[in-house]
Amino acid sequence: MEMGRGRKGMMLSFLAIHAANEYYKLPWKPPVTAGLLAANTLVYLRPAFLRSLLPPIDEVWFNPHLIIKYRDLKRFFLSPFFHLGESHLVYNMMSLLWKGIQLETSMGSAEFATMVATLLGMSQGITLLLAKSLLLFFDYERAYYYEYAAGFSGVLFAMKVVLNSQSENYTNVYGLIVPTRHAVWAELILIQMFVPGVSFLGHLGGILAGILYLKLKSVYSGSDPVTLIIKSLTGALSWPLSFVRNLFGFRRGRISGRGTVGRRQTGRTVSGTWRCEACTYDNSSWLNICEMCGTSRGDDGNSLNQFSHHSRDPPLEELRRRRLERFG
């Protein structure tokens, strides 16, 4: 039965508040996970500026018969991003938020994005293969070969396999205590038993995709080509920003020393520099005032401390303040 308008928006509001709260607490905000959350939510909400671009759900259902017969790749790749209702979307996105933050934080955004794309393709492909195999070998067509399915849960099952693969702990799955690394199998069976209308093959395909992904990763220990491509593109996009920043720094005309700061050293300084007696910073011979702390250079090449003889080393906060005043 259709929920009322007010109640219907409550679950999405809860999802938005929960996601914002989780991201607020993180020192580093995983961008790929946030992008996936936004993409799934926007597809479901279908705002006006996207309606002309998004096909209706009737054209993107995952249906093995239609995909194979018409080679409909749109159904193959887009069906995970479409959800049947608000509860379906919110449940999947809460799961994505939890798994995505942990995986992306541990492996990095480039590798995580590659993994998600790989798991999506694998889970959809394995599900298609299972449905076709049941039809060919067992003539079992009604339940799976012609069924319609949508949603991100297949990818989430695959992500759960990867996330829990190294765990030696136990977890509670709907009241059943099982080893964490095998919890996904218990969840598959229990969901099938107690939640009507879910795609058993879609979830099973996700689990098998996660297992296959781990097998391939164990055989090939290096960075996969797709990850290398993503990292290269990221580096290429960040190069113009670095160039502008370096160019901006060059135009400031700052004459810098060798940049050695630390405990007092009695050894010789590099030719063309003089060492500040106050903060031990090696300055360029072109400078008469230490660019770190502002202490004047003496005629003999040493520095003349501008502070009282009662305190040979200036306070750290004073050094910072002077440097900010000079170059801020």
Image (tube, rainbow, N blue to C red):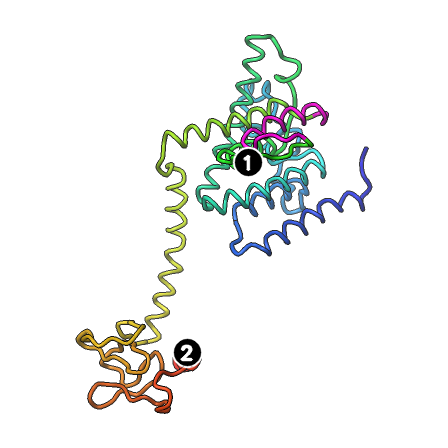
Mark 1 vs mark 2, CA separation in Å: 48 Å
Name the spot of residue 277 as percent of width and height, x first: 28, 82
Asked if residue 58 lies left or right of residue 26, the reply is: right
Name the spot of residue 221 as percent of width and height, x first: 36, 35
Q: Is residue 210 above or below residue 43?
A: above
Q: Residue furthest top?
A: 138
Identify which residue is drawn at 23% across, 85% down. 302
Name the spot of residue 308 as percent of width and height, x first: 37, 91
The residue at which mark 2 appears reads as 316
Element under disc 2: helix
Would you call the spot at circle 1 few (<14 residues within 10 Å), some (14-19), or many (20 or more)? few
Task: Give 205 or 241, whichever is nearer the viewer.
Answer: 205
Asked if residue 156 lies left or right of residue 299, the reply is: right
Location of residue 219 (image quadrant): top left
Q: Is residue 260 magenta?
A: no
Q: Which quadrant is home to the N terminus?
A: top right
The residue at which mark 1 appears reads as 169
Q: Which residues are magenta?
A: 176-197
Q: Is residue 102 above or below residue 81?
A: below
Name the spot of residue 249 as percent of width and height, x first: 35, 70
Identify which residue is drawn at 60% across, 46% down. 38
**Dot 1 amino acid type:** Asn
**Dot 2 amino acid type:** Leu
Would you call the spot at circle 2 few (<14 residues within 10 Å), some (14-19), or many (20 or more)? few
